[in-house]
Amino acid sequence: MQCYKMAFKKLALINQCRRAYGSIRQGSKYSTTYRQYLKLEDGSVGSYFHDVPIGIQKDKCYVNMVVEVPRWSSGKFEISKELKLNPITQDVKKGKVRFVNNIFPYHGYIHNYGAIPQTWENVTSSSSLPGVKEPLFGDNDPLDCCDIGSTVLKMGDIKTVKVLGSLALVDDGELDWKIMVINTEDPMHEKINNLADVEKYCPGLLDATRYWFKNYKVPTGKPVNEFAFNGEFQDYDKTMKTIEQCHQEWKGLVAGKISASPNILLPTTERKGTSISVKDDRLPDTPVPDHVNKWYYV
């Protein structure tokens, strides 16, 4: 009977992410005009950042994930911190949309890449971590997560995922955690429960993950990235503490309890129920530049 109860509980959790979430799209994908907003069950517009529940359960195995970038794609899409209701947009630098370079032997992102909603890496608070000389501030974003499941997911998908561990990336002097997860709808998720299982059933994946995050900016002329903890992956227990801490930081953010210096722009915190109206006004995709498909050897 207990097994049936656990099975029903798990099914209810997965169904939580199968709500009638939709999207409202504006502009042309792969251009600076593109916006993908979260459409809620009642047809109103919500925030991918603030209105999707984090989904932590009592057993603390599962959280929710918002997919920003499907595996093998190159566009640097992310939940916007600046725009009201936090749509998914493509990152822009010097007026141009950004793509990650393909570092041999990979094409684009090697995971389904996204964010854990209702978390925030506090840009106003620093921490000292092993392997890093200077205290690190958060990167001002929701926690990043990397789904290792076999299915290529879609931008804007909201999935229940199992937490496996984490990697503490130091990116441009900021702490940028990468949470390793597996989609609970994946055929392998019952077998993969921790980092040791990842090594057993997906040999080489953790090393490839560390290599990719270390080197993916090298083709742009930047140095290799560094890691806290000397590049060692952190286990499930330590990772859940990080997630819970960042969830508490998010609560402080949306409650207006975070003070920042004038040169720091905190994320917008508008949520569902506001008077903001968004209409679907999508345009055909913009052609991807030829250089995006180039391979780099680092």
Image (spheres, rainbow, N blue to C red):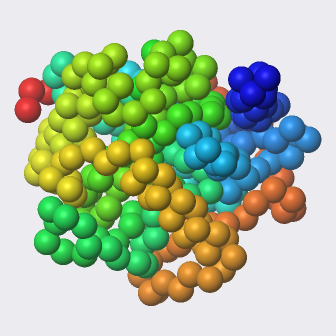
Residue 93 position, x and y percent, is: 36, 52
Residue 43 position, x and y percent, is: 88, 40
Left or right side of 192 for 88: right
Left or right side of 134 for 241: right
Q: Say which of 280 and 158 sits in front.
A: 158
Residue 285 found in image quarter: top right
Q: Is residue 68 visible?
A: no
Q: Say which of 258 and 85 sits in front.
A: 258
235 w.r.t. 192: above or below: below
Say which quadrant the N terminus sits in: top right
164 w.r.t. 187: above or below: below
Task: Find the residue positioned furthest to the top.
Answer: 187
Left or right side of 47 for 133: left
Residue 127 found in image quarter: bottom left
Residue 210 found in image quarter: top left
Q: Residue at x 8, y 32 (%)?
A: 298
Q: Is residue 59 visible?
A: yes
Q: Residue at x 26, y 56 (%)?
A: 171
Residue 259 position, x and y percent, is: 53, 86
Q: Residue at x 68, y 57 (%)?
A: 50
Left or right side of 81 for 150: left
Residue 13 position, x and y percent, is: 73, 34
